[in-house]
Image (cartoon, grey):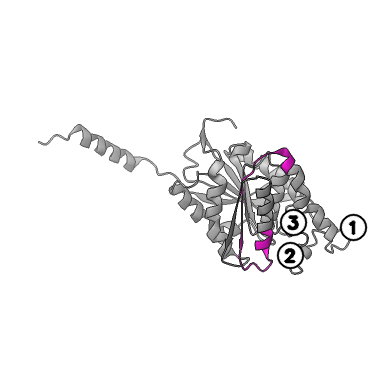
Amino acid sequence: MRIPSPCSTALLACAAMAAIAPAAHASEVRSTEVQSPALGRALTYNVYLPTGYAESPNVRYPVMYLLHGNDGARNDWAVKGKMQKTVDTLVANGDIPPAIYVMPDANTNWYVDLKEKMETAFLQDLMPHVEKTYRTINARNGRVIGGLSMGGYGALRMVLQYPEKFQAAALLSPAIYNPEPPADSSARHVKVFAEPNTSGAYSKTVWQQYNYPVLMDAFLAKGIKVPMYINSGDDDEFAIEAEATQLYSQLRKAKQPAELRIVNGKHEWMVWETTLGDSLKYVFSTVSRPQVGTTK
């Protein structure tokens, strides 16, 4: 009779344990909602939970808020942007930490308190709900934000106004037109940037009151470093490559950390899907890794 060596016995035991141990649940994207007093209705959103989330009840994860473009929806990132596959691959390769991703519906509201109180809903209703419902790291170094087009506009406004809340930002083809949107931009036609008590016609004055240049001085005065990843296609129909370069130059001049990528493509999902991974690697480079046994 051949007696297994201690080494082979240990290997057999490990193999047996692996065979009976339950596998970690794969990542998932759920659709859900939160009641928003600011909006007076439900705010729907998708949430991505990383592989093994259910099996690690004592672990808290960094969180990223991903904002869609004009007239988009919470499903855009998962369906058109294939974010789940991108994130899973980056996590498996060790390029980014496991994290929670939240993708709210904002229709054509541009993430400002004009047509609806979408900015207030995001900050006062959605974020507290997320931090209560999911095991997020509820601190600046565990929280990042990103968006495309209209969502890039919204993400930039958020970090300039509240740099104490966000560790980094990813701005993909951000619709941050300075001094004004081009004639064919949706910003002129969605009845958001309008004077109060009017028919909703676009107002240059309102646009400039809400665009990022008016926020820049106060942001820089706080002295908080917020790494920003900024990109655009080189054939963007709205010439956002110029807007992206202008913003990047301002940040660099102010010694704010930033990266700029001008890639091949138009104002389209091909650009955003193929650059999402690069942007995630950048914004997560200074973010806290998942934490065990924390209370926040």
Q: Which residue is mark 1?
A: 197
- Which mark is first along the chain, 1 or 3? 3
- Measured in 3D between alpha carbons, the distance from the residue under mark 1 to the one under mark 2, in whole angstroms, is 20 Å
Q: Position of residue 62 (x, y in %)?
A: 56, 41
Residue for badge 3:
109
Give the residue at x 40% y 44%: 23
Marks 2 and 3, Cα distance to the nearest angstrom?
Answer: 11 Å
Residue 19, picture quadrant: top left
Query: Dot 3 surroundings within 10 Å: few (below 14), some, or many (20 or more)?
Result: many
Tell me residue 274's x, y (percent).
53, 60
Marks 1 & 2, CB-CB < 8 Å contact: no
Q: Are marks 2 and 3 in contact (CB under 8 Å)?
A: no
Label 1 secondary element: loop
Query: Residue 6 appears at what percent x and percent y?
Result: 20, 32
Quarter of the image where one finds residue 221: top right
- Look at mark 2 in the image and give the residue it sits on: 186
Give the percent coordinates (x, y) of residue 293.
Answer: 52, 30
- Say whether residue 82 is magenta: no
Q: Earlier in the sequence, mark 1 or mark 2?
A: 2
Label 3 sits on what residue type?
Asn
Q: Determine whether, in the image, residue 198 is placed left or right of residue 126.
A: right
Instruction: Indicate yes or no whether the magenta region holds residue 230.
Output: yes
Which residue is the extreme one toward the right? 197
Q: Residue furthest front?
A: 253
Range shown magenta: 220-244
Asked whether the viewer can see residue 37, the reply is no
Mark 1 or mark 2: which is in front?
Answer: 2
The answer to whether residue 54 is left or right of residue 15 is: right
In this rendering, is residue 223 above or below 258?
Answer: above
Query: Along the line of sight, which residue is nearer the eye, 231 or 206?
Result: 231
* Residue at x-position 74% and y-position 65%: 186
